[in-house]
Image (cartoon, rainbow, N blue to C red):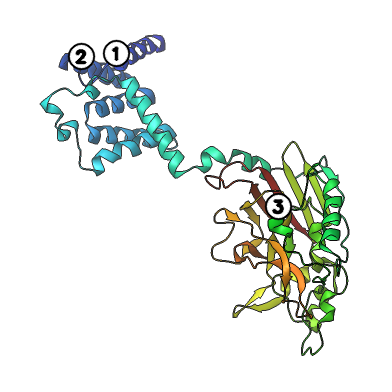
Amino acid sequence: MDKQELEKLIDKLNAELTSLSTYSSYEEKQNVLEQINYILSIDPENINVLYDKAIYYEMLGDFKTAKQIYEDILKIEPDNSLVKESLEACKIPLETGYDNFSDLNLQEGPSPLEKVSVGVIVTAKIIILIIVLFICCPWLFFSYNDRKIQKIQNTSAFQTIKVNPMSDYDYLSKQQIYDIRKNYVKNSLFAGENYEPDNAVFGAIADNKPWWGTISCNQLNYKGDYHERIEGPSKVSAQMNNPDALVGLSLPFLPWQDSYNQEFCNGNYSKFLPVSIQYSKKDNLIVAKYKLTKKFLKFRARVNGKNTRYPIQLSGLNARDFGYNYVYIYDLKNINMFGSLNAADDVQIFSDYIHLGGSCKYKDGCNNISPMQYDKMFTVSALPAEINLKLWKNKPFNMFKKADIYYRIIFEK
């Protein structure tokens, strides 16, 4: 038999198989099976006809035979995803003890399901498979944009955002601080005519008080009044003066100053002011870069009873001010999260705000950011390192939902 004649037989088989149902007569079912077996006697490894034969037995409720045929097909084509999926679906009734439809008391009378054609059964199986994948593997449906953003490495065409220097906020009034903030926001990506600093974030600023400065390490055996902690530019100005840096960085635990970590204690990079900020409107992505050194990776601190690299905390002060309350870390490179339950495991909420606190130990307290957020702390294990964030204004139904804006932090040597 030549190829053309064989194709005609297969076309005829497909037409009859599509119209077949469990309610068809014995003669109709037997005729289809004979056609299948005849074609396979000529072309025993015809995958399409073998698949039809498996569907035929599934339609009759003979799941054991159908399962065996699917397994035989996979011996010929091990990577056939459709057959793998059909095999898994076929196992379900066998695992629940239903070897055939007679176990479901269909012999008592024809069920409406018996009148369903093979084509409808196959379609229903595909729909069920999609539903199962949607529930068990949601990333297949929602992570396309995340993967696209991850692949963006060349940022030469991005818009360059000016990085504003830090400034001293000590003893300014709350209104003066607000005016400084509004001036920087006016020239940012998030400018708006009616912008006012969010009260939940900035409303607790205390008038005419000192602010935490840029001191990066505690002095050993210190017995002074802690005035050093308010000297120089205010630490929070790295974020407040740069509203486009939606997610800032800070050191939640100050290490002890010693001879081995002088580079960090006295270095500019310990202020965690970005060295560059870039933005792509097309990709809805902001990229902030920071400098670190190889020595920084060697520094250790005693935190919660164990030695660890210096932890760094993500700060959502700017993000929260502009309504981006929710964050999820969807990709990390050379980064280890610090907390057991963290923003790389599930969506977390930013809770950063400014208030007058006593952590600086200077008289009457200092304005500073709170609270500690262990779910947003991490350590850097090697350079370069990278954190990719998704931000949302409203809580997403899952972590795979497309972000309202994407944000990337890069640590370079």
Residue 328 x/y as whole percent: 61, 52
**In the rendered structure, which disc, 2 or 1, sits on the residue that comes first in sequence?**
1
Q: Which residue is mark 1?
A: 16
Residue closer to the observer: 161 or 177: 177
Quick one: quadrant of the C terminus?
Answer: bottom right
Q: Is residue 329 left or right of residue 211?
A: left
Q: Three-letter amino acid code at disc 3?
A: Ala
Q: How busy is the neighbourhood of tag 2: few (under 14 within 10 Å), some, or many (20 plus)? A: some
Q: On the picture, is 68 further left or further right than 402?
A: left
Q: Earlier in the sequence, mark 3 or mark 1?
A: 1
State the image quarter where residue 92 is shown: top left
Comes first in the chain, label 3 or label 2: 2
- What label sits on residue 28 in the rendered view? 2
- Using the image as rendered, state which of residue 401 and residue 47 is in the foreground: 401
Is 293 displayed left or right of 349 in the figure? right
Residue placed under numbered mark 3 in the picture = 319
Describe the element under mark 2 as helix, strand or loop. Answer: helix
